[in-house]
């Protein structure tokens, strides 16, 4: 079974631009979460989608948004990029949201490394 | 509110010696606790999780962790380090009603010397 696939692996953008990252979950998984990893702030939760609805949201500005499609694939978008948005963005999927089942481990992709210049 | 503190940012051990990575947590609710490992340029892999069953949790690759409520700790141990264990390790807490909204510790980089 294929794992969580994130595209692209690397991305370079300039300040003020916008970017869209893509995540394909494991087949059959319906929950997709996004995390930002930076050297300064560590790993921080962005948002979680389940059945095309945002279920949880972290403490990020409105420039960060996401969506989930009917096939559970997800995209996240960052508008008006800032230098501080440079990070590894990790996507994770699980069968259900954890509150529905404790036997629903989270599987992470290898991430998209975004560099803003 | 919940938080996680990993007490050591770097730990260095010799191959074949024990590993101890320390983690303290704070949670308003009965938490679920996890340890994840991240190898360079890779995503995160679940090592083990605690969800209010046995307090001693066994994970993959010989790792285990003990949940101590009185000390609010969830330290990760392994009897004998292997070179392939060199990686970054994250202690993670989640409230039961928080979906997949995980709170990560700052990470501990484990170095294994030959």
Image (spheres, helix red, strand yellow):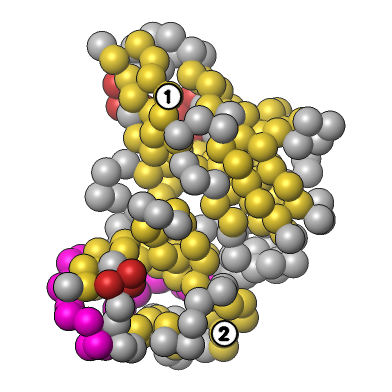
Q: Position of residue A110 (x, y in %)?
A: 30, 58
Question: Is residue A73 highlighted in magenta?
Answer: no
Q: Residues within 10 Å of mark 2 (few under 14, many from 20)?
A: some
Q: Is residue B37 left or right of residue A23?
A: right
Q: How many marks?
A: 2
| Residue at 70% over, 33% down | B73
Q: Is residue B111 left or right of residue B47?
A: left
Residue A76 or A52: which is nearer the viewer?
A: A76
Task: Provide the residue span drawn in magenta.
Answer: A9-32
From the image, which quarter does the C terminus of chain A lie in?
bottom left
Chain at tag 2: A
Residue A53, located in which quarter of the rendered image?
bottom right
Residue marked by disc 2: A54
Q: Is residue A49 visible?
A: yes
| Residue at 45% over, 70% down | A34
Q: Secondary structure at mark 2?
A: strand
């Amino acid at each position: 079974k294929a794992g969580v696939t994130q595209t692209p692996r690397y991305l370079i953008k300039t300040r003020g631009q916008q970017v869209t990252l893509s995540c394909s979950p494991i087949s059959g998984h319906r929950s997709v979460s996004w995390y930002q990893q930076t050297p300064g702030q560590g790993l921080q939760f962005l948002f979680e989608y389940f059945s095309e609805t945002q279920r949880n949201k972290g403490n990020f500005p409105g420039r960060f948004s996401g969506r989930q499609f009917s096939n559970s694939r997800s995209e996240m978008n960052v508008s008006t990029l800032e230098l501080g948005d440079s990070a590894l963005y990790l996507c994770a999927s699980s069968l259900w949201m954890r509150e529905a089942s404790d036997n629903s481990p989270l599987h992470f992709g290898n991430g998209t490394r975004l560099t803003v210049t | 509110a919940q938080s996680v503190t990993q007490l050591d940012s770097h730990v260095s051990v010799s191959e074949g010696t024990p590993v101890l990575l320390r983690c303290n947590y704070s949670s308003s609710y009965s938490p679920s606790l996890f340890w994840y490992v991240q190898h360079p340029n890779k995503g995160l892999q679940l090592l083990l999780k605690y969800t209010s069953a046995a307090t001693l949790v066994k994970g993959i690759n010989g790792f285990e962790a003990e949940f101590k409520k009185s000390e609010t700790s969830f330290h990760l141990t392994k009897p004998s380090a292997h070179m392939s264990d060199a990686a970054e390790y994250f202690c993670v807490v989640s409230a039961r009603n928080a979906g997949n909204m995980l709170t990560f510790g700052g990470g501990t980089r484990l170095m294994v010397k030959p």
